[in-house]
Image (cartoon, rainbow, N blue to C red):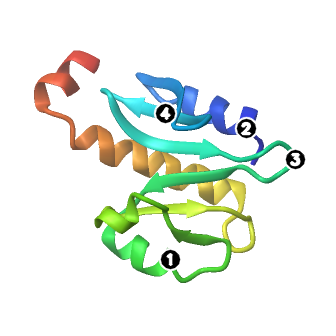
Amino acid sequence: MKLEDYNGFCASLPHATHVVQWGGGHVWKVGGKVFAIGGGRDGEMLAVTFKCSDLAFEILKEQPGLRPAPYLASRGMKWIQRHSAETMDDDALRDYIAESYRRVFAGLPKKVQTQLG
């Protein structure tokens, strides 16, 4: 997945906001909470980090091209980073980003969810 494809997909999710932070990472949020982080060096495949269920985390962390997300997973959070398309194609990655968005949105305070619609 290229950076423009990643940003375009994340931008299509309702109320998603974008900021570049943490050393050039393209961070996508809903209600001020992160649901996806994309980054990488020019000419390299975009590494994408997303939140997932406990079960998905246990399965995905063992797959080639995927790993527990640096920093986040070391703090007990269930985040996976795809750093190559070896076992997860771009369509599956979009599905996981969308699920991460839904998980983060569902965890927002009800007042914030109502404000966002």
Instruction: Tell me the SS state at disc 3.
Output: loop
Instruction: Tell me the SS state at disc 2.
Output: helix
Q: Nearer the viewer, mark 4 or mark 3?
A: 3
Which comes sooner in the sequence, label 1 or label 3?
A: 3
Q: Looking at the image, which residue sits at the far top?
A: 115
40 on left or right of 69: right
Residue for badge 4: 28
Q: Position of residue 50 (x, y in %)?
A: 48, 53
- Alpha carbon of mark 4 to alpha carbon of mark 1: how far? 22 Å
Q: Is residue 103 positioned above or below 20 on the image?
A: below
Query: Which residue shows up at 41% across the image and 32% down it?
Result: 29
The label on residue 48 is: none
Rendering quarter of residue 81 = bottom right
Q: Amino acid at mark 1?
A: Lys
Q: Nearer the viewer, mark 3 or mark 2?
A: 3
Q: Position of residue 73 (x, y in %)?
A: 39, 65
The label on residue 3 is: 2
Q: Amino acid at mark 3?
A: Gly
Q: Which of these two is toward me, 36 or 116? A: 36
- Asked if disc 2 and disc 4 are in contact, CB closer than 8 Å, the reply is no
Q: Position of residue 11 (x, y in %)?
A: 56, 26
How many residues crowd mark 4 within 10 Å: few (<14), some (14–19), many (20+)?
many
- Alpha carbon of mark 1 to alpha carbon of mark 3: how far? 25 Å
Query: Which residue shows up at 29% across the image and 67% down it?
Result: 76
How many residues crowd mark 3 within 10 Å: few (<14), some (14–19), many (20+)?
few
Instruction: Tell me the SS state at disc 4.
Output: strand
Residue for badge 1: 61
Residue for badge 3: 43
Which comes sooner in the sequence, label 4 or label 3?
A: 4
